[in-house]
Structure formats: structure tokens, C-alpha cells
Image (tube, grey):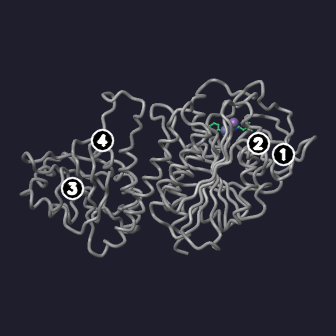
Amino acid sequence: MRFSVTTSPIDKPKAGLRAVGLFQKRKLGLHGERLDQTLERRLAGVLKAGEIDGDAATTLLIPAPAKGAAGTVLVGLGPKKDFTAKSVRKACTALAKLVVDRPADTVAIAVDDLLPPDENIGWLIHTLVGAIGDAGYRYAEYKGKEKVKPVRLKNVVLCVTEEQATEAERACAEAEAILAGASHTRDLGNAPPNVIYPEALAEAARELSRKYKKLKTTVLDEKDLKKLGANAILAVGQGSERPPRLIAMEYSGAGKDEAPVVLVGKGITFDTGGISLKPGEAMDEMKYDMCGAATVLGVITAVCELKLPLNVVGVITSAENMPDGRACRPGDIITTLSGQTVEILNTDAEGRLVLCDALTWVEKFKPKAVIDIATLTGACIVALGHQTSAVLGNNEELVNALKQAGTATYDRTWELPLWEEYQEQLKSNFADMANIGGRPAGTITAACFLSRFAEKYPWAHLDIAGVAWKSGKEKGATGRPVPLLVRYLLDQATH
Ligand code: BES
Ligand code: MN
Ligand code: ZN
């Protein structure tokens, strides 16, 4: 799908569908009135007949008056006095669902009619493009062709005013890059676990650096990891036929001496729990346990597309957590790359193990900030559900910047405390720490564990267990938190 911005009025672009907003009590906006004139008052006629009133997020499709002419979509914006970001977001979602479902190649949207007074055009373009991209996403790699109806929509033309044009163009390019990144993340997440294993993620990273000149990929295999002393990553992977990988994608968009932002993604390509085996129900969804890694690949894609003037390193720490004769056991003690020892009391708490060695390893990049992204704890879903990711960290400024980026993109995150009292739960009788902290505050104690390996730089942790994918009838990867992270990096680039 391609998105473009134009300053011509809604009736001008060649399009199969034209969409305009409608306030409650059947009030059209400026574009709508203009369109109605070119349609010889057809809209007024339809409105009079009472088929749509303008309630928020209702839609009505008025077919083209003649073959070759354009159909009109009315999208309800609710009462004019409640014209806010909230009602417009809902209207964008409804409009997006309708237009991707129609046999039109091109849709023109009267964007400036949809701009609420409490927001700016950039926000609206992001919201609208995000909603259409989301609604138009399909994963049909393994479906017989005839079973999945492809989306016909190819071009989306966004009609704005002269004053909005510059800002709109910029937001449109950003939003398209975020969409490209998030789609990549979703494709990787949705791919089956017999196809996505640690070396497959390494190959995905190499593929990006073949595509983008400013990106350099390095892959450490199991021999390299042994030599390095990354025993925590190795321990998680040792029960699998498919050996672990530690991957770095270095994007250079700024000078050599500028410290990079480092993103570290958890890439457990399948999490059975290992010897501490998970129950069978919905275990297939543990193919999504690499969504942190997929997020890093998606963000790096967007960063490359936008040619951001920053240095960014995308790191993926990847293993498959399987039970086997060689698998690690509860009670095993390992010496991590940092030198600290860990007693593995539960092999299902493997995410923090692959992450701890990666967090030590990234010190070598002398980072300005490190953000890890992980489907780390079921407890996070208990705490925040499927709407909100959790953020914890050792640096207030970094955590606040992430919260702000989440709010701006509606890819929201909420802070949990990382107070030192929680650290006590990680005590081990036999090693420097245990890898689990008991039932209370599971998301916090997991972050406490990570914090012990992230003392040398500003660090934040995003637990995306609840937001990275949807279960049930709509099962599939969401592409979150790509929008949040790209927004954060865009904000960094302008500071
Ligand atoms: N990948 C899981 C966390 C998870 C579970 C994410 C379900 C999304 C849905 C992680 O590796 C895990 O198993 N965590 C354990 C930790 C526990 C053993 C301390 C958990 O949350 O149960
Ligand atoms: Mn696990
Ligand atoms: Zn896991």
C-alpha cells in the first residue's frame, strides 16, 4: 500500500472511493460540502433519508452514481462538541476496516476535516495510516491462494490544506516506515517455529544489511559464544538441535563518536519451558516468544527507511528452549558472561538468561541508552492485560521518554517500580542469585534480575508479553511496540 499527501480538494484525485467526515446531526465538513456540490447534492439526499446520523465511528458507503465514478464513504465523527482525539481514533479504525474491504484500488480521504482541535496533523496522519496499515495486514504465507481474499487497496491519497502539507508529508513518510517495520515484525512473529529458529533470525538480520548500506550485521554462533563465556545463552539453548545465536545490527546514521542507542530483543524462537515444561494449552503461542527480536528487526527496518541521523544497534539474543537429554536442569548453576553466578530454579524463566549475557555484551558499544524488549513474564499480562506493556528501568529520563513515546503513538506502556526491596526475592542459597523470584510481582523480579547486568548504562526494559500478539480468533502478531520505539528514536533524532 502506498500513501501520499495532496493539497487538492477531495473531488480532484482519481479514486474509486472518497471518504469524508460527518458530525452528528448529519453535518458535513468543508470537504464534504464541496463533494456534495460536485455530486449534485446526492449526499444531502442520502443524509435527509436518515441512513446515517454521524455517531462516532459509524460508516456509510454510498455507491458510485455511475460506472467509472467514485463511491463516497461517510465516517461518523460524533457530536461536534466532543470532536477529540478519542472519537477520531475510533473513526479512523472504522474507516480503515471499511476501505480495505472494498474493491477499490485508490481511496482519497478528506483528512483535514478529521482533525480535532486538540491534535495536530502529524498525529492524525500517523493515526490514520497506522489504522489502514493495520486493517490491511494479511499473513497468508501458508494458506491456499483461493482461501484468503487479498486486499485490493493500493493507494491512499490524503487530502490536506496548504498549511498542513509540510508536516503531513513528514508524518506520512514516518508512518509508512513504521508500517513497513511493524509488518516485518508481524511476519516474523507469525511465521511457524519450524521455520524461525536462531539461525533464521541471524539470516533475517543479514538480509537487512544486504538491503541497507548503513547497516552492518555480526553473528556470534555457539562456538563464538563458548569462547566469549556467554554461558547463560548457551544453557538455554543446550537442549535444542538448533544452536543459539547472538546477533548485532549496527546502523550508522551519525558520526563515529556518537554513542548509540542499543535495542536488545529476546529471541526465544520456541519456549516449551524446557525441563520445567509448560502445560500444553496454547503452547503453540510460544512461537511468539521471539517477538522482542522481531521488534528489533522491525525498528531497524524503519530506522533504515527513515535514514535517521542516529547510531542505533539492534541486538538479538536467540535460542530455542527445549527439553532434552542435554537440556539444563532446575538446580544447575551457571557462570554468566558478567561473572555473576545464577542458580536455575526454573528452566521456564529462560528469557532473563538469554538477556543477561546480551546486556553484558552490549557494554562494548558504549551505549547512550539500552532498551531491552521481551515477552518476559506471564505476570505482566495479569498486571496490565493486553492493552499495555510494562516499562522498568534504572534511569528516569529514559523511562519517561519511552512512556511519552507510547502515549503519542497509542502504543502505550506503564511503569512498574524497580525498588531494591524486590531484589531480595532473587536470593539463592548456592549462587549469586536465583533465576526466579516467586509468585509475587513476577514482572518486577524479572526486571530486578536484568538490572544486575545493566548497571553500566542508562537502561530500560519493556515487557511486551501482553501486547506482542493476540490470541483466539484474531490470533496474530500485532507489531507492537515498533511504533513506540520508532517514535522514541525520532524524538532522539530531533533533540
Ligand atoms: N515466555 C514466557 C512468558 C510468557 C508466558 C509470555 C505467556 C506470554 C505469555 C517466559 O519465558 C516464561 O515462561 N516466564 C515464566 C517465568 C516464571 C517461571 C518465573 C512465567 O511467566 O510463567
Ligand atoms: Mn519461559
Ligand atoms: Zn519465554
The quadrant holding residue 136 is: top left
Residue 425 has which mark? 1
User: Neighbour class for label 4 at 10 Å: few (<14), some, many (≥20)?
Assistant: some
User: Neighbour class for label 1 at 10 Å: few (<14), some, many (≥20)?
Assistant: many
Q: Is 422 displayed left or right of 403 in the figure? A: right
Q: CA distance from mark 4 to mark 2?
A: 46 Å
Q: Earlier in the sequence, mark 2 or mark 3?
A: 3
Q: Nearer the viewer, mark 2 or mark 1?
A: 1
Q: Is 412 displayed left or right of 183 in the figure? A: right
Ligand 3 placement by image quarter:
top right
Amino acid type of disc 2? Answer: Pro
Name above or below for residue 247 compared with residue 308: above
Amino acid type of disc 3? Answer: Arg
Q: Which residue is mark 4?
A: 151
Q: CA distance from mark 1 to mark 3?
A: 60 Å
Is there CB contact under 8 Å for labels 2 and 1?
yes
Residue 26 has which mark? 3
Q: Earlier in the sequence, mark 3 or mark 4?
A: 3
Q: Which residue is mark 2?
A: 440
Q: CA distance from mark 1 to mark 4?
A: 51 Å
Q: Earlier in the sequence, mark 1 or mark 4?
A: 4
Element type at marker 4?
Answer: loop
Q: Nearer the viewer, mark 3 or mark 4?
A: 4
User: Neighbour class for label 2 at 10 Å: few (<14), some, many (≥20)?
Assistant: few
Q: Nearer the viewer, mark 2 or mark 3?
A: 2
Element type at marker 2?
Answer: loop
Amino acid type of disc 4? Answer: Val
